Image (spheres, rainbow, N blue to C red):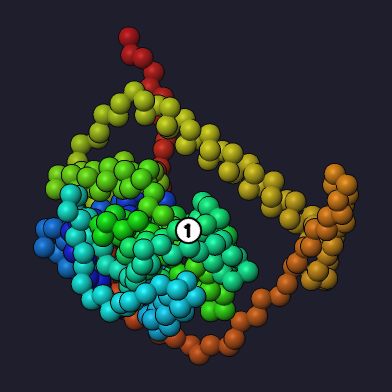
Amino acid sequence: MMVGKKTKDDMASCSILPGIAGIVPYENMSRANVLSRAIRAKDGENVRDEFDPNPGQKMAMELGDLFENVILERCVSTLGLLMPDFDVDFAVQHEEIPLQGSMDGFAFAGDKLRIEHDPANGIYVMGSNLAEMSGKVILECKVTRDYPEEEPKLYRGPMQLQGLMDIEGAKWGVLCVLYQSTTLRMFIYHRDEVMVKEIHKLVKDFDRRVKNKDPYPPVNPDEALTIWQQAEVNAEPVELPEEASDQIELIELASESIKKWTGIKARATAEVMAMMEESPYGELWKDRQGEKVCYQVRWPMRHYKAQDEKVVPAKDAYSVRQKTLNIKEVVYEDSE
């Protein structure tokens, strides 16, 4: 079942492997955040309820909890798998590396189960047209609001599945994905030795960083803010290294470019608005390399419901570190 986290918070688990790899587009699953939670959990802090999914993630998780067994039963029946078990209420531990995982379920393929790539029936054999499955098969279930896809993104199950297959010593796994509550697709994966080797490398490095409290080099201001949340007001200025000069110049150049193109965009937008006047919709047809292309431009009304007057509740004073740098160039004349 998806409900409740079974793995430890202070170590790597299969579900956070994409976060450790830095391939998840959600900030709450960035490398900096998953590492920060593990470090604080190792220090005894309760981080179990800290993960705050966005509304889309929350809805998908709730639907997954509701429909998981139904989805898995349909996948097992369609593929002809045997002796399924969807009541795996414990974490599994890797024998060689500090990695845990929790399976949504597993089944068996017998001596040799031949399954052909059959998109018309929602069956996708990844990397081949035929799967000759045998032994234990790991089952993973996902629910998403996204449109159906021919191959799930790595962070939406495949990497997690490979980690679980490695822990269990299984050669095969099936990722069952329900798209938009209407389209069920079954993605069949064989053990990927290249990915498994990368997972081992990532997990060992993650474990080292947790033990040594060694953060990943930040790749954006949000990650830097996760690592260094507070500033010492009375601290002495840091003597920045010479290479900081290049980064400061890039920041200033990018800021000027953004300012320039923001202005250009604003002027162009205003000119198109002037052409549309009171109309909420406009079209521009063009020929582009032999194709007819239509630019559909909308300038709609946005409607707001009336609201009663609200009294803003009192808040305690607090401080947070800003996400931007303030850079000022100061020129000093050489004194003789």
Drawn side of residue 148 relative to residue 270, left or right: left
Quarter residue 204 falls in: top left
Could you tell me how many numbered marks the image carries? Answer: 1
Write the residue at 31% across / 58% down.
Answer: 170
Which image quarter is the C terminus in?
top left
Give percent across and percent down for residue 146.
55, 68
Give percent across and percent down for residue 208.
18, 44
Q: Is residue 43 above or below residue 50?
A: above
Between 272 and 5, the one lying in front of the other is 5
Give percent across and percent down for residue 29.
36, 59
Is label 1 in a helix, a strand or a loop?
strand
Q: Which residue is mark 1?
A: 131
Which image quarter is the N terminus in?
bottom left
Write the residue at 36% across / 14% down.
Answer: 334
Residue 60 at least partly seen: no
Give percent across and percent down for residue 159.
38, 55
> Could you tell me the amino acid type at mark 1?
Ala
Write the residue at 26% across / 29% down.
Answer: 239
Drawn side of residue 181 relative to residue 195, left or right: right
Between 70 and 265, the one lying in front of the other is 70
Q: Is residue 276 above or below residue 4?
A: above
Q: Is residue 293 above or below residue 208?
A: below
Quarter residue 9 falls in: bottom left
From this viewpoint, which residue is outermost toward the front?
111
Quarter residue 279 falls in: bottom right
Drawn side of residue 85 relative to residue 93, left or right: right
